[in-house]
Amino acid sequence: MRLFSRSLKGEAFEWYISQEMKQWPSWKALAKDFIERFGYNVEFIPDRYSLKRIKQKSWESYREYAYRWRK
């Protein structure tokens, strides 16, 4: 589990070092807590249908829209 901390940066690293190591009796317990905390950050790979549904907002410039579409 100590090697895991070397792969973390920013908020994830701060979260990890602020935790009590005793709360995780196993790697699985640590992984579960980590995913619960940072699961929203998982990369989403859109398919062509979800890309087609992205529409330009009325207040959005074309550049902002194109950036959001590429993201």
Image (spheres, rainbow, N blue to C red):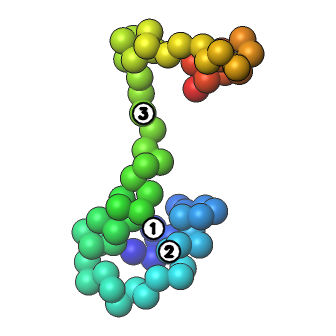
Q: Amino acid at mark 1?
A: Phe
Q: Residue at x 42, y 33 (%)?
A: 44
* Marks 2 & 1, CB-CB < 8 Å contact: yes
- In the image: residue 65, left or right of residue 32: right
Determine the CA span between mark 1 and mark 3.
23 Å
On screen, residue 43 above or below 54 = below
Residue drawn at (46%, 70%), measured in percent from left and top? 3
Residue 31 visible? The answer is no
Q: Nearer the viewer, residue 9 or 70?
A: 70
Quarter of the image for residue 46 reads: top left
Q: Who is closer to the viewer here, 3 or 17? A: 17
Mark drawn on residue 4:
1
Q: Which residue does the image show at 53% across and 82% down from the upper left? A: 18
Q: Position of residue 40 (x, y in %)?
A: 43, 49
Give how far apart the Cα atoms at labels 3 and 2 are: 24 Å
Q: Secondary structure at mark 3?
A: loop
Label 3: how many residues lie within 10 Å, few (<14), some (14-19) or many (20+)?
few
Q: Which residue is mark 3?
A: 44
Q: Of the residues shown, which amino acid type is indicated by label 2?
A: Tyr
Helix, strand or loop at disc 1? helix
Where residue 69 appears, x then y in whole percent? 57, 18
